[in-house]
Image (tube, rainbow, N blue to C red):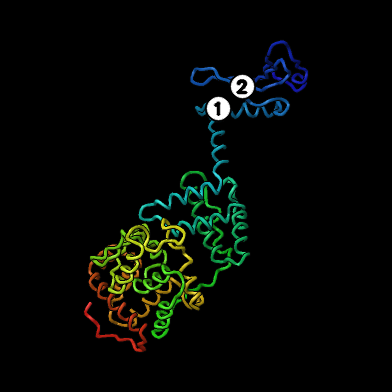
Amino acid sequence: MPLTDVAIRNAKAKEKSYKISDMLGLFLLISPSGSKLWRMKYRFKGAEKKLSLGDYPRVSLRDARKQRDVARDMLAEGKDPSFERHREKLRGEALAENTFTSIAQEYCNKRRRDGDRAWAPATATRCEYLLSLLDHSIGRMPIHEIEPIDALAAIRKIEKRGKLESARRTLQLASAVFRYAVATARLKSDPTRDLRGALTTPTVTHYGAVTEAAQVGELLRSIDGYEGQGMTKWALQLAPHVFVRPGELRHARWEEVNLETRVWIIPGEKMKMRKPHQVPLSRQSLAILEEIRSITGSLGYIFPSMRSRLRPMSENTLNSALRRLGYASNEMTAHGFRAMASTLLNESGKWSSDAIERSLAHGDSDKVRAAYHRGTHWKERVAMAQWWSDLLDSLRDGATILPFPEAMAG
């Protein structure tokens, strides 16, 4: 006979637990303490089992019957209701632990060791910092609960501080984290996929760079007269000769440099394009390196931090030194030595554009072409490195006309 609410309310506690039955396996267990617990008895693969459905009156008779019917549907599909409930509980706990911040950290760790696609150390540090800006907004939220409006509000907090480029880049990184969560089966879709046009587009600004010959000479003379820390002066002196990226220069180590063969081989993990890069060293570059080695020895970082030789020079050191020399950020930056070299080498008409691009370590989407150019332009790059250093010396010494000799055969 089916149970009624009246019968349930009138059921009194006894010395021992007892049960009163409803229908289709549902019953109510009354304990000596007076608690009334819903249970369902069923059989699965020949074994008798029981499923807890909650306590009365928190779970009403009507709700208990609904749970029973759901469990019976599972049985009809060949599923064990107890197992499915346990699995759902574990899934819920896992989802609650999968906050945006925890998955962002997991994603960043993956990108740090992602083979040819791995982030360079400086890139990883920058990306981790930008993602950390979301810690106090969506960081603690389970990732599956984050809606587009949550993500947009978090990014706009950055935008409102005037950090338009940081906001744009943070949105890109957040989207990458969400897509990673999708790929690892913790999220159904990226909630930022339709937010692409929501942010203010930042004005594109280029690195400040001195590219006029006469101004290059003035800059080089200023560097030679720099009165700050000696290691910073050496780095500023070497930078225009090798024109690598500032991070690659700061992280240079003695074991990467062969003074005998006059080559500096930068490992792929330090390069933006994640491929090893060979830098031919001119006589002038060698002289600077030899001077440094005579003071510091030939172990560890070539340009270590002032506080510890176990760390490289700070990323702000060279730009700060240029500010001390009187160059504003829109006039000259540490990255600007690359634009300087690219501009004057191309304007000379002496060197092939492929050799210049290879020296700048710019990527080539055609892998066959890239491999071919790496081999065929090495001799030209060696000659170009010496010519470039000689030109810098000439400009530093006051030359006003670029001494471009006849173009050599590529």
* Residue at x 60% of width, y 47% of height: 141
Residue 207 in view (yes/no): no
Is 171 or 40 nearer to us in this picture? 171
Q: Helix, strand, or loop for circle 1?
A: helix
As measured in the structure, the alpha-carbon distance from the residue carrying label 1 to the one carrying label 2 is 10 Å
Answer whether residue 387 is visible to the viewer in this image: yes
Rendered residue at 27%/72% (across/down):
381
Q: Quadrant of the C terminus?
A: bottom left
Say what amino acid the circle numbered 1 marks.
Answer: Pro
Where residue 330 appears, x then y in whole percent? 50, 76
Q: Quadrant of residue 335?
A: bottom left
Q: Which dot marks residue 81? A: 1
Q: Are marks 1 and 2 in contact (CB under 8 Å)?
A: yes
Front position in the image: 59 or 358: 358
Q: Residues within 10 Å of mark 1 (few under 14, many from 20)?
A: many
Q: Which residue appears farthest toward the bottom when viewing the image?
A: 401
- Which circle's residue, 1 or 2, is located before the other in the chain? 2
How many numbered marks does the figure carry?
Answer: 2
Quadrant hosting residue 300: bottom left
Above or below, 394 against 129 in this view is below
Residue at left 25%, top 71%?
Answer: 377
Seen in the image, is 184 located left or right of residue 136? left
Q: Position of residue 351 (x, y in %)?
A: 28, 78
Where is residue 354 drawn, in percent x and y? 29, 72
Quadrant where the N terminus sits is top right
Is residue 361 positioned above or below 12 on the image? below
Question: Residue at label 2?
Answer: 40
Res 231 quadrant in image: bottom left
